[in-house]
Amino acid sequence: MSERPDIDPTRLQQRRRDLLVQEAVETRQRARLGGWFYAVAAALAFAVTGLEPVYRVAALATVAVLFALACLRVLVPLAAQPDERGALRYLRAIWAVVLANTLVWGAFSAWAQAALPDPAPLIALLFSGAFGMALAHTMCMRTVPSMLTILLVMLPTQAVLWRNVSAGVGAMWLIYTVYMLLVMRRSHREYRTRIELEEELRHQRNLFERQSRLDGLTGLPNRREFSACLERAHRAGTEGAPLSLLILDIDHFKRINDSFGHLAGDACLQAFAQRLQAFFPGEGGELCARLGGEEFGVILPSDGAAAGARAEAFRAALAGSGLAFDGQREPVTVSIGCGGFDPARHADADALYRHADAALYKAKLGGRDRVEYAL
């Protein structure tokens, strides 16, 4: 795998893990198919001998072993969502089976050249060439085991050809083997380039998706994500789960912008978001979000009374300490509307939101720096 020095260590570790998992998934897809052809090829090579009694035991044993190895290539387990350890464990196991598969075939092919009557040696020879080239193209995910599989298929036959047929035929088979290894190396480079590109595209897509759900200034979920979460929470509420909603508005925020500038206003929003998230840290399904401007929302898995008590505690703490931003600490207060889910009144998530928003409006009319409850 090519390293990317421009990627931070956390991203690099995630990249390695994702590539390993993708490699395990693709290796499983490719390994499951090829094993059956070894058993079919051996059966065909024995069939053309007329299955004379002298070959029957060898035929049954060879085909049975190759068939069992084909079954193992399918049965080696891989989780539907493998982690890094599971992917690595699978790769070690499946490559061991594939290497055993090619070892058995290579031994059979060499034995066929030396012991079986025509045309069985030719059939074994043709299948060895086909298997070697198929391995070079399809089982190219890892260089060393891929090379070993090709060599296990090709070299036993090459040794017999060199000794029993002619040095020229043996040399031809050796050249063919080298060509397969070169093809495998090229296939490996193309495979790595492809999966690294696919991984980067997936990462960029996921990053874009995450960014589309977050507010760019505060890092909190944005209104789109808030609405989706509120819909899910409302569905859970209709099934009996407790649910409350807070809508918060920073009091007289325009004064901060007018007095200190918009950069200070942005810093104030960031400091407020940090304070809000620290007070409502997301335990048990809580969600803090920026709804727009100086307005924020909090979804709470609790009843209205408990949510109101927490809202009041947050309001009082903020009023008592203010916010530190732009190199200074300024008094900042907040108005909060609190709405507890009532299935009789809140047929949908929008109804709950409207009630909490009406409570916020009441808090503003009542002098701000206060918590009001939806009626």
Image (cartoon, rainbow, N blue to C red):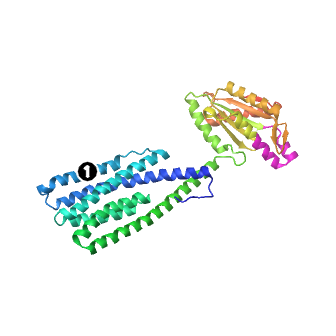
- 182 lies above or below 243: below
Q: Amino acid at mark 1?
A: Val
Q: Position of residue 192 (x, y in %)?
A: 49, 60
At x 23%, y 53%, the residue is: 63
Q: Residue furthest left?
A: 53
Q: Which residue is mark 1?
A: 65
x, y percentage for residue 311?
73, 30
> Magenta segment range?
250-271
Residue 150 in percent (x, y) is at 35, 62
Instruction: Check the image and name the residue furthest to the front.
Output: 163
Secondary structure beneath dot 1 equals helix
Is the residue 108 above or below the residue 349 in the image?
below
Please tell me whether residue 308 is drawn above or below residue 257 in the rendered image.
Answer: above
Residue pushed farthest right? 259
> Front-most of 335 and 312?
312
Q: Quadrant of the C terminus?
A: top right
Front residue (pair 238, 346): 238
Residue, x 60% and y 51% (percent of image)?
11
- Compared to residue 375, the image places residue 152 above or below, namely below
Q: Is residue 342 left or right of residue 36?
A: right
